[in-house]
Image (cartoon, helix red, strand yellow):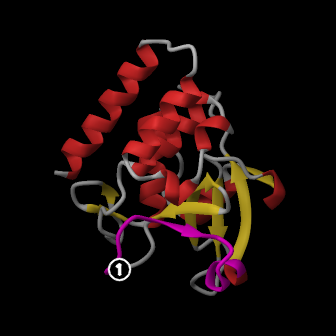
Amino acid sequence: MRFFLACALMLTLSVAHAQQSPAPSDDMSRLLAERGLLSRIGDVGNKVGNRATELVMNSMAFLGVPYKRGGTEADIGFDCSGFVRAIYQQTAGLLLPRQASEQAAATQKIDKHELQPGDLVFFNTMRRTFSHVGIYVGNGKFIHAPKPGAEVRVEDMGISYWAKRFDGARRVNTEQQP
């Protein structure tokens, strides 16, 4: 079922993109609203470029996929870095390293105030730096595969748990495609 929903979302995005409508941000806003996602992340389509919008939309298609330690695929589940890696590979054609700490080392450090949708956010959740990663979706929120027994979800970086554990933000250079 999740695979079908992801395919339907990608087909919808492809059709919308192929039609070259004069107001793509309106199409994106409508799609986000239809999927019930605007209330979670706000109007991302008006704030970012096409690549970042694609990253965020693709990641939203996996809401509800269960956490699986070492998981790298939707049909079996994701861990945090497997989720990020899969989204960047599917959307931008980039193969990021497998572990969160390696992803941090392989990307460009940015200030928290420079965050844009599609950037990576890192947290210290296991008493070591860069032990958890998610994708920033805008409005102070990020999407991630949190922990065993949970599912891919959107959370607010401002809540106490995440604010205390924030390790930094990184930007992936999506122009370096294979």
Residue in the picture at 23% in, 60% down: 76
| Quarter of the figure with residue 139 | bottom right
For the residue carrying disc 1, how many other residues have a C-alpha within 10 Å: few (<14), some (14-19), or many (20+)? few
Q: Position of residue 24 (x, y in %)?
A: 55, 24
The amino acid on which the numbered mark 1 sits, given as a three-letter code, is Pro
| Observer-nearest of 147 and 128 | 147
Image label count: 1
- 100 within the magenta span: no
Residue in the picture at 31% in, 70% down: 68
| Observer-nearest of 50 and 46 | 46
Res 76 visible: yes
Residue in the picture at 19% in, 42% down: 4
- 1, above or below 8, in the image: below
Report whether 150 appears left or right of 172.
left
The magenta stretch spans which residues? 149-163
Residue in the picture at 49% in, 54% down: 84
Report whether 153 appears left or right of 116.
left
Element type at marker 1? Answer: loop
Q: Position of residue 159 (x, y in %)?
A: 64, 80
- 118, above or below 13, in the image: below
Pointer 1: what residue?
148
Q: Position of residue 7 (x, y in %)?
A: 26, 37
- 165, above or below 39, in the image: below
- 161 within the magenta span: yes
